[in-house]
Image (cartoon, rainbow, N blue to C red):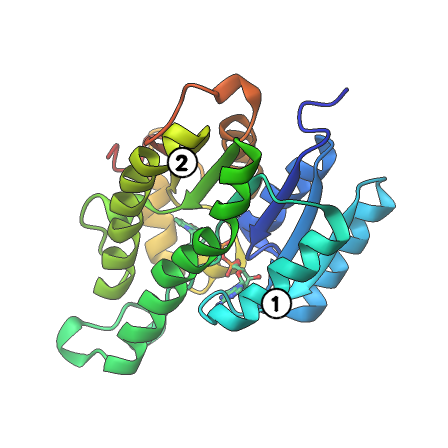
């Protein structure tokens, strides 16, 4: 028996980067996995790779900010794999619309950009919980993990104010839901990554990433797998008494 056999996981932003590693970790630990991504081709390819390794997996396309699209995807995923008992809300964006891959200053920020970041990073997580929590309540068990950021806990000059606010919002969201859903056997935690080497991170000015690496006590960037292994712990039976926590996976960077 693998650690997650018999479980069904929905992972958002699973087409690449951290979400792909989290979804793959669950698939390789025996869970059936819904790979959900805005990008249909990435979602399909990731699920197909998992299926080739022997996992039950489906790749579905939806924008997490679109409640109706997410409702349809959850229904399709549940029909294919069964009731969802693990939700990993990971899809997120961090626009760097300033000069040379830097954040926009707040006084220059486009209001539509602010809204889109809040819609994807924060409302997207709400949409997922709204859709899967009733099923978890009926099962009497569940695991919810959201990807926040060290930038949600302290000032980080690399990101914009929309991103920091959305990730701080996810921390309040996590603690509130841990209280509300705990009596139904559902744990709710968040992971706060530091600088993790993904396509999103590579969209930032290289000097900023190098400065972050040098300021990281472990003197390296994180890998998606570093984050995925913590996620797999939080969704496992081994973490059954851990809830309402924000776990930094940051090599000591910022030590929030
Ligand atoms: N990479 C880092 O250094 C870092 C640090 C802290 C937090 N994070 C967070 O980790 C998460 C994953 O980041 P990453 O670095 O892997 O990013 P990434 O851009 O490499 O991958 C994100 C994936 O999410 C998908 N996605 C984006 N918007 C979506 C939407 N609206 N609906 C559905 N899918 C969507 C993308 O298509 C992509 O496949 C994000 O929430 C990000 O904020 C990343």
SS type, badge 2: strand
Hey, which quadrant is residue 216 in on the image?
top left
Does residue 227 sit above or below 11 in this rendering? above
Disc 2 target residue: 188
Viewer-side residue, 102 vs 248: 248
Where residue 65 appears, x then y in whole percent? 44, 68
SS type, badge 1: helix
Viewer-side residue, 188 vs 192: 188
Is residue 205 something that shows in the picture?
no
- Left or right side of 156 for 244: right
- Left or right side of 239 for 101: left
| Numbered tag placed on residue 72 in the rendering | 1
- Left or right side of 66 for 172: left
> On the rendered image, what quadrant is the C terminus found in?
top left
Seen at 73% across and 23% down, the residue is 2
Seen at 41% across and 55% down, the residue is 125
Hey, which quadrant is residue 219 in on the image?
top left
């Amino acid at each position: 028996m693998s650690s997650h056999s018999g479980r069904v996981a929905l992972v958002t932003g699973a087409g690449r980067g951290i979400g792909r590693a989290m979804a793959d970790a669950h698939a390789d630990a025996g869970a059936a996995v819904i790979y959900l991504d805005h990008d249909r081709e990435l979602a399909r390819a990731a699920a197909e790779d998992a299926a080739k390794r022997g996992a039950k997996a489906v790749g579905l396309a939806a924008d997490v900010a679109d409640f109706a699209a997410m409702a349809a995807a959850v229904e399709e995923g549940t029909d294919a794999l069964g009731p969802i008992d693990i939700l990993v809300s990971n899809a997120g964006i961090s626009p760097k619309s300033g000069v040379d891959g830097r954040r926009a200053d707040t006084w220059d920020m486009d209001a539509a950009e602010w809204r889109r970041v809040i819609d994807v990073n924060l409302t997207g997580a709400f949409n997922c919980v709204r859709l899967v929590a009733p099923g978890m309540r009926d099962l009497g068990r569940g695991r919810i993990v959201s990807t926040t950021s060290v930038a949600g806990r302290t000032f980080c000059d690399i990101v914009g104010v929309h991103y920091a606010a959305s990730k701080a919002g996810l921390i309040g969201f996590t603690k509130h839901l841990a209280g509300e859903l705990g009596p139904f056997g559902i744990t709710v935690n968040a992971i706060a990554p530091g600088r993790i080497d993904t396509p999103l991170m590579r969209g930032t000015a290289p000097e900023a990433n190098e400065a972050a690496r040098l300021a990281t006590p472990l003197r390296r960037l994180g890998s998606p797998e570093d984050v995925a292994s913590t996620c797999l712990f939080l969704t496992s039976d081994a973490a059954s008494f851990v809830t309402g926590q924000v776990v930094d996976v940051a090599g000591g960077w910022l030590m929030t």
